[in-house]
């Protein structure tokens, strides 16, 4: 039996209907949290929430387009209402990753990357962190990427957006610590998800640049996220945890 260390807490997981977000949502629910899952696909999101409920967990799905600021703000409001007036854990997991030469990145794709990867987390934190401070506790975990730390050809738009999220992690850590809110991030390496399936063999090739030379699983990334969100990480604050098979160690 998994320890119910998130019992009585509400968690919002963006992009919780697939990949890493789904693994996080399922793990948090298994450990007692009531989980609000957001995503764009109603059918898939409701399927994940129903699956959590079928094994005794508590979860609901809220449709949201994180590229739209009104939708982001509506998501925060709905999560607070569903959580009975509070959200204790925020996992900013949703992201998009336009890849390609800088000269080939369309303005719409660039704008969408910054809207989803930077603006959406910014305004979710703006809406939810002050309420966490009022309650005297809370945890925020942002999901970045290893290419936010080193340069990779073809990843300028994506990597720079996630580098901004890493800096926001540190800024929010400085801003909200006195109110009892911890803010951290994880930096995944190549991970096999529905979203990265389009990369084909190039995902394995990228993984071969890491010391462990293998692709990670959503569950392996989720384990780090859940740990940082938990009370076990009570003194860990303002850090970025690499979960990348050792890529940032070399």
Image (cartoon, grey):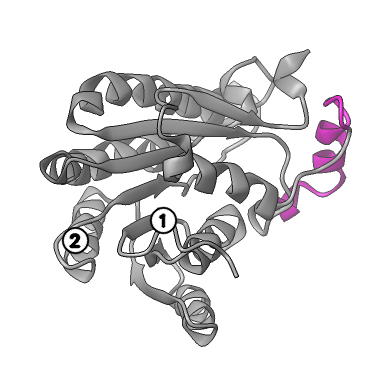
User: Crowdedness of circle 1 by 10 Å Cα count: few (<14), some, many (20+)?
Assistant: many
| 206 magenta-colored | yes
Dividing the image into 4 quarters, which one contains the N terminus? bottom right
Residue reaching furthest bottom?
54
Dominant SS type (magenta):
helix
> Looking at the image, can residue 115 be seen?
yes
Q: Which label was assigned to residue 72? A: none
User: Crowdedness of circle 2 by 10 Å Cα count: few (<14), some, many (20+)?
Assistant: many
Q: Is residue 12 above or below residue 54?
A: above
Q: In the image, residue 192 lies at what x, y percent?
A: 74, 51
| 232 magenta-colored | no
Rendered residue at 10%/42% (across/down)? 134
Dividing the image into 4 quarters, which one contains the C terminus? top right
Q: In this rendering, would 182 be left or right of 28?
A: left
Mark 1, secondary structure of its residue: strand
Which of disc 1 and disc 2 is earlier in sequence?
A: 1
What residue sits right under mark 1 in the picture?
13
Mark 2, secondary structure of its residue: helix
Q: Is residue 92 above or below residue 30?
A: above
Query: Observer-nearest residue: 25 or 134?
Result: 134
Q: Which residues are magenta?
A: 196-212
What residue sits right under mark 2 in the picture?
80
Residue reaching furthest left?
134
- Residue 112, by quadrant, is top left
Rendered residue at 19%/59% (across/down)? 74
Q: In this rendering, would 124 be left or right of 35?
A: left
Q: CA distance from mark 2 to mark 1?
A: 13 Å
Q: In this rendering, would 114 be left or right of 249?
A: left
């Amino acid at each position: 039996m998994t320890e119910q260390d998130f019992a009585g807490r509400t968690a919002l997981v963006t992009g919780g209907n697939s990949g890493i977000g789904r693994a996080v949502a399922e793990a948090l629910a298994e450990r007692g949290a009531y989980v609000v899952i957001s995503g764009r696909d109603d059918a898939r999101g409701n399927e994940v929430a129903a699956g959590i409920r079928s094994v005794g967990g508590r979860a609901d799905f809220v449709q949201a387009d994180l590229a739209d600021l009104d939708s982001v703000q509506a998501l925060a409001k709905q999560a607070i209402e569903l959580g009975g007036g509070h959200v204790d854990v925020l996992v900013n997991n949703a992201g998009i990753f336009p890849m390609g030469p800088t000269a080939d990145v369309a303005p719409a794709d660039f704008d969408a990357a910054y809207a989803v990867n930077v603006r959406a987390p910014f305004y979710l934190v703006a809406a939810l962190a002050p309420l966490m401070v009022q309650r005297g506790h809370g945890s925020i975990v942002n999901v970045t990427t290893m290419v936010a730390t080193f340069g990779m050809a073809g990843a300028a738009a994506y990597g720079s957006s996630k580098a901004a999220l890493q800096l926001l992690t540190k800024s929010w850590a400085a801003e909200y610590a006195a109110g009892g809110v911890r803010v951290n991030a994880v930096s995944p390496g190549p991970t096999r998800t529905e979203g990265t399936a389009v990369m084909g063999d190039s995902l394995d090739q990228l993984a071969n640049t890491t010391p462990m030379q293998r692709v990670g699983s959503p569950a392996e990334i989720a384990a780090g996220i859940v740990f940082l969100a938990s009370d076990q990480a009570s003194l860990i604050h303002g850090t970025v945890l690499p979960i990348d098979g050792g890529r940032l160690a070399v």
